[in-house]
Image: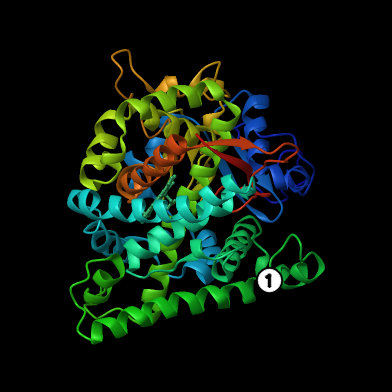
Amino acid sequence: MIYKDRVVFAEKRADLKAPSAWPLIGTFPLLAHWVNHIHEAFTIGFNELDKSTYSLSAFCIPHMIITIHPANVEHILKNNFENYIKGPNFSAAMDDLFGHGIFNANGEEWKFQRKTASHVFNVKNFRDQFTDVFMEEMQYMSTHVLDKAAEQNRVIDFHDLMYKFTLDSFILLGFGVHLNSLHQEGKVPFATAFDEAQKGTFFRMINQFWPTTERPASLILPWILPDMKAGLKVVDDYAREVTEKRRAEMANGQTEAKDLLSRFMKASNAKGEPLSNDELRDIVLNFVIAGRDTTAQALSWCFYMLTTHPRVERVLLQEITENITDELLADSSALYEVIKNKMNYAHAVFYETLRLYPSVPLNQKYALKDDIWPDGTHIKKGDYVVWSPYAQGRSEKVWGLDAKHFRPERWISENGDIKRESQGKWPAFHSGPRTCLGQHLATLEALVAIICMVRKYKFTLSPGQDIHYQISLTLPMKNGLKLSVEKR
Ligand code: HEM
């Protein structure tokens, strides 16, 4: 009963290696020690065991099999999609924040939301509407925040600014509402509460006993564990306010709107009934995390990379200078075409950022039946399977000896085109039927922002910062990103 590689009562998985652990509690002390650097801990595990798949068994955490093998990842997400669902532990941990929204849904509930939302992401909207929204928000940010910071020699928190940019952009194009968080100093209360609620949700995912331990732990360690109840109330109120505002507008005859929320309001749910306020609340919050956090984080890590890799910044600026003019920036449809067809190096910079800093750094599913993975690993019904895009991006087995280096050139083929990698090797946007619905939207938004900002400003990293991720469902920067700004 007392084993050195797993928790008491856990079954031995003879075909899998496991990190050395403690009797009864498995790898719990190791994970507790590394909790703030959890993605490094997994990365080191792969290196030390010299394996692409291993088993992890720790007190508090459901037993999991973790992999960075590209063929396994593709198998889970695409080739044997039907066998892997969002499991019961995951759903319970996510329920308070995400309810029955798309991230937490399986089966018919998921299909309905995916189908309804997918109508919004068509080429016409991209060309004619989305680019306009991103340019509008970018121009506001440029004139009212970045120009002023440059004139006053002021250091900005770039991470916070990107959150505001992506939040305002997404709330406008997704829900037809001007939130104007860019107009405000400091963080908006909704954003603070939403960040805390996500952090708390992540702790729920890694602690099976959270229903009993969460409340006392948040009283004893308030700087580590957030007050979930208070955070959820702010977030909930906000989502309901957005929904009610839109409902009132529609009741007043404004039925033309084709944004995401209006489409869901006009649709019927899987039972053929109009969506309730609770269902709409879940939809709003799921799309806010999708539309705000991931892209803001990717942009922040991207500028961290650019400020620390001047050679890359020079090549990027050259591509921008060759292709982008003031006239083009005033014509959104033409700008969209140039971004799509001519800005290969800018795409490479964005993809390379997501390789090293994937906005969803760790992910998991639950096996419905026994299975065998392409690398020969045996999976049993009820196993939690985990893949780590963060560890995968840094693995020499997957990306070669320069895996840890930021080198956008790896994405450019010999004839100068963008190289396509399989989504099993680069699952930054997931893969298969649940692949990210906003992948093209996020790429467009990020490229508009990168192009406009690199063209007009030179950013410099303020010295003495501890730049590290905050453990959460996504990959926020724990202490922000302080940059100074000069006009070029
Ligand atoms: C850099 C930006 C982004 C990255 C890296 C990213 C990545 C991902 C990943 C990894 C997933 C799978 C999550 C899961 O396990 O369920 C996902 C799902 C999703 N993403 Fe994104 N995303 C980004 C931006 C966006 C944007 C801007 C939207 C806008 C609506 C969006 C919409 C969605 C939706 C709706 C899903 C759920 C798909 C489904 O379950 O069918 N994403 N994304």
Question: Callout 1: 10 Å neighbours few (<14), some, many (20+)?
Answer: some
Q: Position of residue 437 (x, y in %)?
A: 32, 51
Amino acid at dot 1: Asp
Q: Position of residue 271 (x, y in %)?
A: 25, 77
Q: Quadrant of residue 428?
A: top left
Q: Identify the residue position indicated by label 1 in the image.
A: 227
Numbered label tally: 1
Query: In the image, what residue occupies the spot 49% across and 56% down?
Result: 144
Q: Position of residue 218 (x, y in %)?
A: 74, 68
Is residue 180 among the parts visible in the rendering?
yes
Q: Is residue 75 left or right of residue 126?
A: right
Provide the secondary structure element on which disc 1 rests: loop
Between 333 and 405, the residue placed more toward the observer is 333
Name the colour scheme: rainbow
Q: Position of residue 31 (x, y in %)?
A: 72, 45
Between 31 and 411, the residue placed more toward the observer is 411
Q: Residue furthest right?
A: 220
Q: Is residue 82 left or right of residue 351?
A: left
Query: In the image, what residue occupies the spot 47% across and 67% down?
Result: 98
